Image (tube, rainbow, N blue to C red):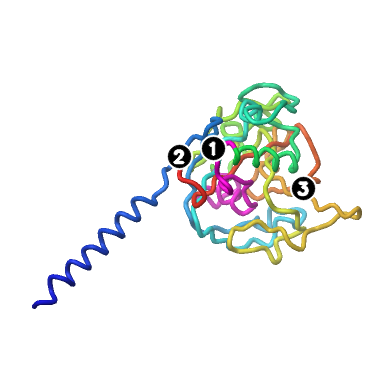
Amino acid sequence: MRRTAPVTLAVASLTLLAAVSVHAESPPQTYRNSIGMTFALIPAGSFTMGCNPIFERGGNELPDHPVRIGEPFYMQTTEVTQEQWMGLMSSNPSKFKGSSNPVEQVSWDDIQVFLKALKDREGCGACYRLPSEAEWEYAYRAGSTSTYYWGDDADSLGQYAWYSQNSGEKTHPVGQLKPNAWGLYDMAGNVFEWVADCYHESYAGAPGNGSAWTGSCYRRSDGVMPRVLRGGAWGDLPYGCRAAYRIYVTPADRDYLVGFRVVGVVSARTP
């Protein structure tokens, strides 16, 4: 009986420490940074990435394959706006001007400069980056398995996305239409979004852990490795706004159909 009290006390202490540790490490569901970017916490989980073969025309969305996102991450709830870009950079490159419109005509290389400036501003070494392609699709789907994050009905597209039939051939202020189940706006339409991955002609050999795929990339005849764009844009038909749709351009490309959103790394900062 002499050992009962110390053992009981030790178990209770470990339980309390574990509870305190879990509470202390639980990240907030949303946060807003110093230049007004809002982020939503995306939970860890698994999904099937890619497209059902009956919908895929060219093969670059196949094979569909399981992906496990092992750690939660923050996804910016909207595309980066022109106001946010100008908060760090010296100019606004966008064709369609508007402080709340997505910044566009920014290259993959330009975004690396923006991300460095943002990390310097926030005082964190690795707290922001582009999403991997797998993270992007996982966040788009928000637990769904349908063609779009709201279902398979293309007739509902105008409620969620600025695309060829409702955009008036221009971008629109972010966050005006319905979000997906995880509170993310404009994941379909408005502007294409850069991701971290270089392009591969299919998903054969793709990583299953959600990381960016940056090895054994497709190279053009001039040696340039294109980067992936996701989400469709204001000029796209419904087909281009699907969860699995993907295209590629060179890292130096600047186009008024293309913008981006940012990932916040949970383990690298405490908002």
Residue pointed to by mark 1: 77
From this viewpoint, is residue 156 visible? no
The disc labelled 2 sits on which kind of residue? Thr
Q: Is residue 240 magenta?
A: no
Q: Which mark is residue 248?
A: 3
Asked which secondary structure carries label 3, the reply is strand
- Within 10 Å of disc 3 (Cα), the crowding (few <14, some 14-19, many 20+) is some
How many callouts does the rendering have?
3
Magenta stretch in the rendered image: 121-149
Q: Residue furthest right?
A: 222
Q: Name the N-terminal-most of marks 1 and 2.
A: 2
Return the residue nearer the eye: 219 or 27.
27
Cα distance, mark 3 to mark 1? 23 Å
Residue pointed to by mark 2: 30
Q: Name the N-terminal-most of marks 3 and 2.
A: 2
The disc labelled 3 sits on which kind of residue? Tyr
Asked which secondary structure carries label 1, the reply is loop
Asked which secondary structure carries label 2, the reply is strand
Cα distance, mark 1 to mark 2? 9 Å
Q: Name the N-terminal-most of marks 3 and 1.
A: 1
**Residue 124 place in picture, x, y as percent:** 55, 44
Q: Residue at x 25, y 58 (%)?
A: 16
**Residue 189 place in picture, x, y as percent:** 65, 36
Q: Quadrant of the N terminus?
A: bottom left
Residue 36 placement: quadrant: top right
Return the residue nearer the eye: 245 or 77.
77
From this viewpoint, is residue 153 visible? yes
Residue 30 left/right relative to 14: right
Return the residue nearer the eye: 12 or 163.
12
Cβ atoms at labels 1 and 2 below 8 Å apart: yes
